Amino acid sequence: MEFEPKILAFCCQFCAYSAADLAGSMRLQYPPNVRIIRLLCTGKVDPLHLLKAFQEGWDGVFVAGCLEGECHFLQGNLHAKQWVNYVKKLLKEIKIEPERLEMFNMSAAMGTRFADTVREMTERVRKLGPSPLNSHRVTENTEK
Amino acid sequence: MIVAKRKPIDEIKEMLKPYQKILVLGCGSCVAICMAGGEKEAGLLATELAMAFELDKTPKQIDNLTILRQCDKEYIEEVKDKLKGYDAILSIACGVGVQYTAEALGGEKILLPGLNTTFLGATVEAGTWAERCRACGDCVLAEYGGVCPITMCSKSLMNGPCGGHEKGKCEVDRNRDCGWVLIYERLKKLNKLELLTAIHKPKNYGAVKRPDKIVHEAYQTPQITQIKEAK
Ligand code: SF4
Ligand code: SF4
Ligand code: FES
C-alpha cells in the first residue's frame, strides 16, 4: 500500500484559510492528507507548535500566510518565515529532514494555489517517506 | 545582561546519556531576553531532545520548567521539591545559574550546562546581542567618551589605535568595527577630542579579585543578627 503522509497546515484566516475554502467552492481536487489549523495570522505560529507537531507524529507541516507585504498585522508572515527556518535547523540537527516543514504565501483569491500547495507538500513528503519518528514507532509496534 | 548561546545538540546529548529522568531548567531573566534559556527555549530544547533520544532508540523522560532567576535562592527554593525527582537537571541559565542552582540544592543534584555563557551585552536589534563590557572592576568609560576600549578594541588598547584599521574596521576581523574609531567618533560628537591627548597608565587588571565577592555596606554591620538573638 502506498504511504499516505499526514500533513498539518497552519493557515492564516485572511489568506490561506480562505483560499482553502475557495478551493472547496471551486470543487478543486486536492489530496485529503491535510488537516488545517486556523490562525489569526501566521505571526501567531510558535516554534514550539511546529516542533511539537513533529513530536506528535505528523509527517509534514506547513505554514501558509498572506503574500509578503500583505500581512494584516504587517510582519506576522515574515516572523513566521523566520521561525519556520529556525525550526528547520532544529529538525536538521536531530536528523529529521527539514524539507518536511515549509512556509508558503498566498492570497485569499488563490484557491488553485492552495490546492497546488497541498499537492506539492503531499508529494514531497510521500517521497521522503514516513517521519523518522513514525517509522521508528511503527517498527516498534510490529515487533511487539 | 548576560548573553549566552545554546550548546551544540550533540554535546548536550552526550552529557545526558547516562540519565533517564531529565529536567530542562530555564531561567526567566538574562538568558530569556537573549532567547537562549527562557521558557520558550526550555520547551523547545526539551521537545527536541525527547525526539532525538527517541530516534536513537533510547527514549528518555525530558520535562521542562522555568523559574524567574537561577542566581537567587528564593526562586530555586520554590521548586526544590520538584527538582528532587530528576536524575539530572540541564540548566539553561548562565554559568552562574547552573552553579548556584547546584549549590542551593545542597550539591546533591547533578546540574549540567545547556548553554555557553558568552558575554555581557545589549540587545542591538531584535535577535542580535553585542558585547559591551568585560566587568573589569575599574570603569574608565569617562575617559573614552563612553566607549569601552577594553571591550570594543580587539586588543584592548588603552592609548590609541594600533594603526591597522581600514575604513573603520578592525584588522583582527574586518567585519568588526575598530573600537578606537568608535572612541574617536564619539569624542568628536561630544566635542571632547582633547581627551585623546591624555596618556593612560597601564590598566589595573587586579581591580577584581577572581573570584570576587561584594558585601553591601548596609549589610556589613552585625545588627541584624543581634535583633534575631534578642528575640
Ligand atoms: S541565572 Fe544567570 S541568566 Fe539567570 S538571571 Fe541570573 S545571571 Fe541572569
Ligand atoms: S571599563 Fe569597560 S570593561 Fe571596565 S567596567 Fe567599564 S565598560 Fe566594563
Ligand atoms: S494576516 Fe495573514 S499572515 Fe498575517
Image: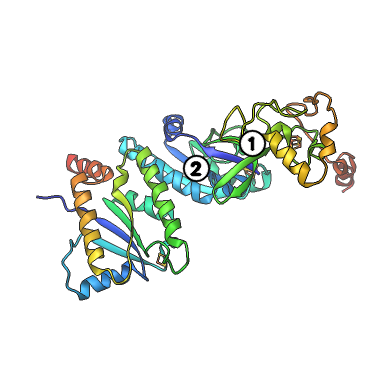
Q: Which mark is residue B24?
A: 2
Outermost residue, bottom direction?
A25
Chain of the residue on which disc 1 is drawn: B
Q: Identify the element where label 2 is drawn.
A: strand
Q: Identify the element where label 1 is drawn.
A: loop
**Quadrant housing residue B229:** top right
Chain of the residue on which disc 2 is drawn: B
Q: Hey, what amino acid is under mark 1?
A: Gly
Counting from the top left corner in percent of width and height, residue A33 is at 21, 59
Counting from the top left corner in percent of width and height, residue B139 is at 79, 36
**Which of the four quarters of the rendered structure image does ligand 3 lie in?**
bottom left
Query: Which of A55/B177 is in front?
Result: B177
Query: Which of B105/B217 is in front?
Result: B217
Does residue B27 appear anywhere in the picture? no
Q: Residues within 10 Å of mark 2 (few under 14, many from 20)?
A: many
Label 1 and label 2 in one chain: yes
Q: Hey, what amino acid is under mark 2?
A: Val
Q: Is residue B118 left or right of residue B50?
A: right
**Residue under the point 50% across and 51% down:** B40
Query: Which of B207/B182 is in front?
Result: B182
**Residue under the point 32% across and 35% down:** B56
Outermost residue, front direction?
B167
Give the residue at mark 1. Answer: B168
Does residue B226 appear anywhere in the picture? yes
**Quadrant housing residue A6:** bottom left
Q: Which mark is residue A85?
A: none
Counting from the top left corner in percent of width and height, residue B81 is at 57, 45
Spatial distance from mark 1 to mark 2, Cα to Cα?
Answer: 43 Å
Q: Residues within 10 Å of mark 1 (few under 14, many from 20)?
A: some
